[in-house]
Image (spheres, grey):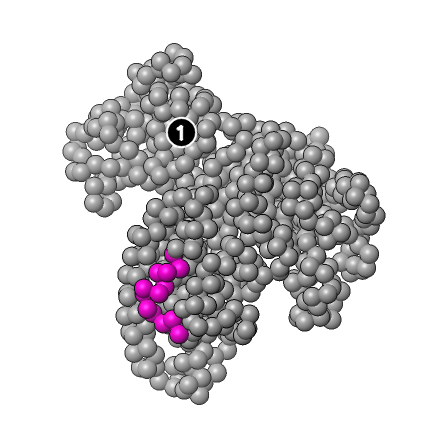
């Protein structure tokens, strides 16, 4: 069974159970400057999990393109990747545990034909440190006995007596209870790490057992400890996680129950592919096999013949696949944000290819784009359309990196014996892209030992500084849904309407960043705006604020929204049903006869807004400047 077949089966399975299929969001989040990448399926759905109605209804399903930069250094084993697809289904206040768990079990055992005897599950064991408010009473988070009972019933129906217990005594246990560090899910981790406003809840994971016969546990670092699903020895692989997202963190550190109880399921497509095809190595599935085949031919080496060669092939395959998918979504190599991560992926792939005989031969490296396009020709045809362009970008980046390598080697040769330390090793990595393994070899040639632990300490310190800088840069970003950010978001819509009505109707938004202090909008226009034009924009927005017109959310078919002139985010894909925020509504906008004169502004948007414009305050443009060829930028505030 291929990855395409698994994806199609999953979407069809939940569509038959009343779920609307929604498109994957881009890898780079839209209107969320607090994070570089979309790292899970629920990330674009936060407003709807918190209670905002979704235009496609209460039951949703999709396959979300995801990227986790934190996993770059983990890549090289048989299960970690940077880019992956997350199969997801959601209940927005509709069904809950007793429907979700049997459905996923049915999908695994009926649609994918997995042996139920190979399936093990985990549940939340409670957290006495955290207080949750129910009916005005504060109670500790208790063990999820309801989920245990549901799983026992599910297993009993296939003839399995499923005992529950703990990983300390795993013999005969099929339902394992773990603490919040393992079986609580939020974007920030366990309950005490969640920031105010963040949703989360207990979860239940499903694991596939590859069996004792592979002897994976005895050959692992965990061989002297009991084997259980979360021991990371490789015998078990997590293939799905049902999150019961029912709580929200408060300013005082407590949790309250959300108005609606949600199901947020995520299952890695690549891992399901490995399990269905009976291998703990995802690089032996069709998700990677085409890339590995080309690497074998180029390098005249076979996969699974040498552990170090295998590791290098996995890194190259993962990094090139991730790079292709990022570039398909518009990311280009650079020294900042997403572009920096992309550049790092390409350069790591080049470095790991060198010892295997591929070197920096750019024509050979470009050959890896085609099997990626082939994998996704049905699900994401845009990859094939951009394949030729992506090959050129990789070629240019490889040439540029070759020059950087030469400069880095010259800098390395300048280092005195007393300068061969972990700090300068990190500087080589930071400035020239040298990974630890390459620098370690350079050090060894000069009779020095590079301490990996100290190198990682320097790296982690740099990461902490970067995170602190990013947090400061994006303080009050749109995702926090604070009162002032919400006001500025509504003003952002009014300003776009003003630009189109007062300056040029062909103006479209080309990017935005909205914090608690100001809004920033990029838009297409060929020249600098005059002082009079900026004054007219301010006047238009402030008139609409003074008029205290309503802001209405309307769910409608995408085709109808387009016909009435609703604006959409540049480059974004939308489902068949969309949410449209309309400012100054009059008349019947559900009708295809509606026209722009019936409203002040209409935009496809899932973010938060005020209900009436009168609460916004006074709108002031602070600066207008160039943001690139044919792109202008405006900064504005509310006072």
Q: Position of residue 30 (x, y in %)?
A: 41, 40
Q: Which residues are magenta?
A: 357-369
Q: Is residue 502 visible?
A: yes
Per the image, the residue denoted by label 1 is: 604
Describe the element under mark 1 as helix, strand or loop: strand
Please name the residue shown 58% across and 40% down the image.
9
Q: Position of residue 7 (x, y in %)?
A: 55, 43
Asked if the stretch drawn in magenta spans residue 248, the answer is no
Name the quadrant containing residue 444: bottom left
Please name the residue shown 30% across and 24% down the image.
542
Residue occupying the far top of the picture:
587
Q: Position of residue 538 (x, y in %)?
A: 26, 28
Up the image or down, 69 lies above or below 476; here it is: below
Name the quadrant containing residue 307: bottom right
Residue closest to the eye, 152 or 273:
273
Residue closest to the eye, 103 or 220:
103
Please name the residue shown 34% across and 69% down the image.
360
Asked if the stretch drawn in magenta spans residue 363, the answer is yes
Up the image or down, 22 lies above or below 371; here it is: above
The C terminus - image quarter:
top left
Left or right: residue 129 compared with residue 57:
right
Up the image or down, 180 lies above or below 346; here it is: above
- Crowd class of label 1 (few under 14; some 14 to 19; many from 20; radius 10 Å): many
Q: Is residue 132 visible?
A: no
């Amino acid at each position: 069974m291929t990855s395409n077949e698994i994806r199609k089966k999953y979407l069809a399975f939940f569509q038959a159970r009343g779920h609307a299929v929604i498109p994957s969001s881009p890898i780079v989040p839209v209107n969320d400057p607090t994070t570089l990448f979309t790292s899970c399926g629920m990330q674009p759905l936060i407003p709807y999990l918190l209670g905002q109605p979704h235009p496609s209804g209460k039951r949703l399903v999709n396959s979300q393109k995801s990227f986790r930069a934190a996993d770059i250094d983990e890549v090289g084993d048989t299960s970690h990747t940077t880019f992956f697809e997350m199969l997801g289904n959601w209940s927005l206040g509709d069904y809950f545990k007793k429907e979700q768990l049997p459905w996923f079990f049915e999908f695994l055992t009926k649609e994918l034909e997995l042996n139920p005897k190979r399936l093990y599950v985990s549940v939340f064991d409670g957290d006495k440190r955290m207080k949750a408010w129910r009916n005005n009473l504060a109670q500790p988070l208790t063990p999820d006995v309801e989920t245990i009972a549901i799983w026992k019933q599910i297993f009993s129906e296939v003839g399995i007596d499923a005992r529950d217990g703990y990983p300390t005594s795993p013999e005969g246990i099929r339902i394992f209870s773990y603490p919040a560090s393992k079986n609580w899910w939020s974007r920030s981790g366990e309950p005490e790490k969640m920031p105010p406003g963040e949703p989360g809840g207990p979860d239940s994971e499903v694991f596939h057992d590859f069996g004792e016969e592979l002897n994976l546990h005895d050959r692992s670092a965990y061989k002297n400890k009991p084997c259980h699903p979360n021991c990371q020895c490789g015998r078990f692989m997590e293939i799905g996680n049902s999150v019961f997202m029912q709580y929200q963190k408060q300013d005082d550190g407590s949790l309250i129950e959300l108005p609606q109880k949600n199901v947020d399921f995520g299952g890695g497509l690549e891992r399901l592919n490995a399990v269905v095809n009976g291998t703990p190595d995802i690089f032996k599935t069709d998700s990677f096999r085409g890339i590995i085949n080309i690497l074998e031919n180029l390098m005249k080496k076979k996969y699974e013949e040498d552990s170090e060669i295998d590791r290098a092939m996995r890194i190259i395959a993962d990094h090139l696949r991730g790079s292709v998918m990022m570039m398909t979504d518009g990311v280009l190599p650079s020294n900042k944000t997403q572009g920096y991560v992309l550049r790092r992926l390409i350069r790591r792939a080049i470095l790991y290819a060198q010892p295997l005989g591929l070197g920096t031969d750019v024509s050979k490296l470009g050959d890896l784009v085609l099997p990626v396009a082939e994998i996704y020709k049905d699900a994401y045809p845009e990859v094939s359309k951009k394949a030729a362009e992506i090959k050129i970008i990789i070629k240019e980046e490889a040439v540029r990196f070759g020059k950087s390598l030469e400069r880095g080697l010259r800098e390395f040769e300048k280092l005195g014996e007393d300068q061969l330390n972990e700090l300068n090793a990190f500087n080589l990595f930071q400035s020239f892209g040298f990974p630890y393994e390459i620098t370690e070899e350079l050090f060894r040639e000069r009779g020095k030992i590079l301490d990996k632990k100290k190198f990682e300490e320097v790296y982690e310190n740099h990461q902490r500084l970067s995170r602190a800088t990013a947090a400061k840069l994006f303080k009050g970003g749109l995702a926090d849904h604070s009162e002032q950010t919400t006001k500025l978001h509504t003003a952002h819509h009014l300003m776009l309407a003003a630009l189109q009505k007062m300056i040029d109707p062909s103006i479209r938004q080309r990017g935005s960043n909205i914090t608690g202090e100001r809004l920033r909008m990029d838009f297409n226009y060929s020249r600098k705006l005059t002082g009079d034009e900026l004054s007219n924009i301010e006047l238009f927005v402030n008139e609409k604020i003074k008029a205290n017109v309503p802001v209405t959310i309307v769910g409608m078919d995408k085709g109808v929204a387009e016909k009435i002139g609703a604006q959409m985010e540049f480059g974004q894909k939308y489902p068949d049903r969309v949410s449209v925020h309309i400012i100054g509504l009059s008349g019947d906008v559900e009708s295809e006869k509606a026209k722009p004169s019936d409203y002040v502004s209409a935009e496809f948007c899932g973010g938060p807004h005020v209900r009436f414009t009168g609460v916004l305050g006074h709108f002031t443009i602070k600066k207008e400047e160039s943001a690139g060829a044919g792109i202008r930028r405006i900064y504005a505030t509310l006072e």
